[in-house]
Image (cartoon, rainbow, N blue to C red):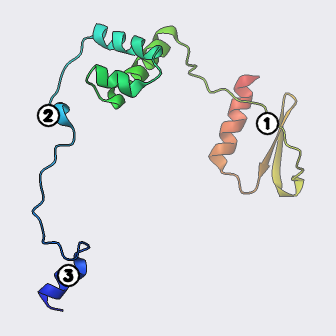
Amino acid sequence: MDDEALETALDTRTGVSPEPVRRVEVLGAMVGRRRSWSLEQKLAIVAEARHCDNLTALARRHDIRTSQLYTWRRELRYALEVHTGSRDAEPMFVPAVSDVDRRGDVAIEVEIDGAVIRISRTAKADLAAAVVQALRSAR
């Protein structure tokens, strides 16, 4: 295939001469700019976001990206959790109840203080040990 035929085959704008690509600025005023925000400024913007319905408009008003606003909110939430200690270090278990009887698949059955654990032949050993250990420590 010659060069002219290849250009015609690849050109979706048949009949239009090729144009040079123009440079487009996508981000406008925010390109290449790094600012530092004080803690008070961040807290004020996050507090304003609590009562705002449109976070994108709020971010534009303060000339920040929406992702930055979400990051500040997440960081504040984590800081509050650490300060108040609301996150438990211990994992919490929920009792599991099953209506399906799979005793044919059970290799080991363990009872600890009234709780029965049925361990399948295909269960991983470390998972079974972790479940047994969790039951022992919970009792």
Helix, strand or loop under label 1: loop
Tell me the residue at 18%/22% (across/down).
35
Label 3 residue SS: helix
In front: 98, or 128? 98
Q: Which residue is mark 2?
A: 32
- Left/right of residue 28 with respect to residue 57 in the rendered view: left
Q: Which residue is mark 1?
A: 96
What mark, if any, has residue 8 been given in the picture?
3
Q: Nearer the viewer, residue 86 or 102?
A: 86
Residue contact at pointers 3 and 2, CB within 8 angstroms: no
* Distance from the alpha carbon under mark 3 to that under mark 2: 39 Å
* Vertical side of 91 occupied by 47: above or below: above
Among all residues in the image, which is located at the extreme bottom? 1
Between marks 3 and 2 in the image, the one whose residue lies nearer the viewer: 3
Q: Quadrant of residue 121?
A: bottom right
Q: Which badge, 3 or 2, is on the more N-terminal residue?
A: 3
Where, by quadrant of the figure, is residue 128 drawn?
Answer: top right
**Counting residues from the N terminus, which is met first, the one under dot 1 or under dot 3?**
3
Judged left or right of residue 41, residue 54 is right
